[in-house]
Amino acid sequence: MDLIAVSDCIADELEKFEQRFTTALRTDVELINEIITYIAAHKGKRLRPILIFLTANLNGRSTARTLDAALIVELIHTASLIHDDVVDDAELRRGAPSTYSIWKNRTSILIGDYLFSQALQKIVQLNDIEISQVIAKVTRRMSEGELLQMQLAGDFTIDESTYFRMIADKTACFIASACEIGALTSSNKQPVQREQLRRFGEYLGMAFQIRDDLLDYIGSESTTGKPVGNDLKQNKITLPLLYALQHSDNGKAGQLRAIIQSKRTPSDFETIQILVSELGGVQYAQQKAEAYARKAVKMLSSFVDSPYKDSLEKLADFAAIRTE
């Protein structure tokens, strides 16, 4: 399964979105246009716009405000990824040279700021206090989550609740907000359904991030678009490693701990991969991702059957098994 198949029922809306995204950012500053053209040519999954359109159509119809909101959310997402690449010194993004690797720190920070400013301008034009509140809250949570991750880097003694709080803030909350915004811009806006879809998105985002953790151990650069083991190299806490270190007292756990605490060589990562798997970290993380995906699907139970509901359910399944 891929996102193209899932988004067939909103193909027209996504086409309009792509047209707006590439034209809305044009300016008379040539450097900005050059970078925007590059970003558009190396676009991501468009997961958040897909979620906004699907949830808006779930119990009503999408509106002009839905398209505007999808553009706002994707601008913020793109800006945050550009800034993330600067923070992480990431040379690759989606298998291609990152904006940071081509235009370096200063330009990348400024183009990220430019995208944020465009999002803010469009929020003002939308003139919707509820959506403004959702965006304000989620951008704060995302920043807190990223800073918490920095604070905890290399601390593999934290408990799972801290880990889950971190990924909820840095990843899941934004996916939840996309679903909530879809509900808010629907032609049939209902408070109860808004909360159900927000929770759907939160659980979906948790599954998505845990699976992302797993791909650092079982993925490949050709499919993920980033070096395998990249999180470990940056001392980021991921669930497979956290479980492997904390749920076994045998010699293998001691060996794993010794490697983690040493100056690691590239060959050490293969050993870490094997040990994390043998100590149950990969299996445990996969079970958690699937559990969150099931919780997400449950949030859709009260909605009538439709192509949009079917696509959202498939997205939940995709989040827990994706390879890219």
Image (spheres, rainbow, N blue to C red):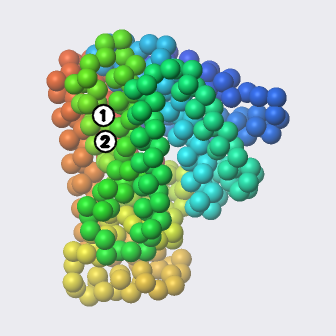
> Which disc number belongs to residue 202?
2
Residue 140 spot, x, y in % from top left: 45, 46
Contact between labelled residues 2 and 1, with CB atoms less than 8 Å apart: yes
Name the residue nearer the viewer: 33 or 267.
Answer: 33
Classify residue 118 by image quadrant.
top right
- Residue type, numbered disc 1: Arg
The residue that appears at 38% across and 87% down in the rendered structure is 258
Q: Is residue 257 visible?
A: yes
Q: Residues within 10 Å of mark 2 (few under 14, many from 20)?
A: many
Q: Name the residue under label 1.
A: 198
Residue 123 screen position, x and y as percent: 53, 27
8 sits to left or right of 112: left
Residue in the picture at 42% in, 80% down? 260
Q: Is residue 139 above or below residue 19?
A: below
Q: Which residue is pictured at 47% across the width and 43% down the height?
A: 139
What is the quadrant of the N terminus in the image? top left
Instruction: Say which amino acid is labelled 2.
Output: Glu
The answer, for residue 50, to whether it is visible in the render is no
Q: Distance between the residues labelled 1 and 2?
A: 6 Å
Figure quadrant of residue 226: bottom right
The answer to whether 1 appears left or right of 85 in the picture is: left
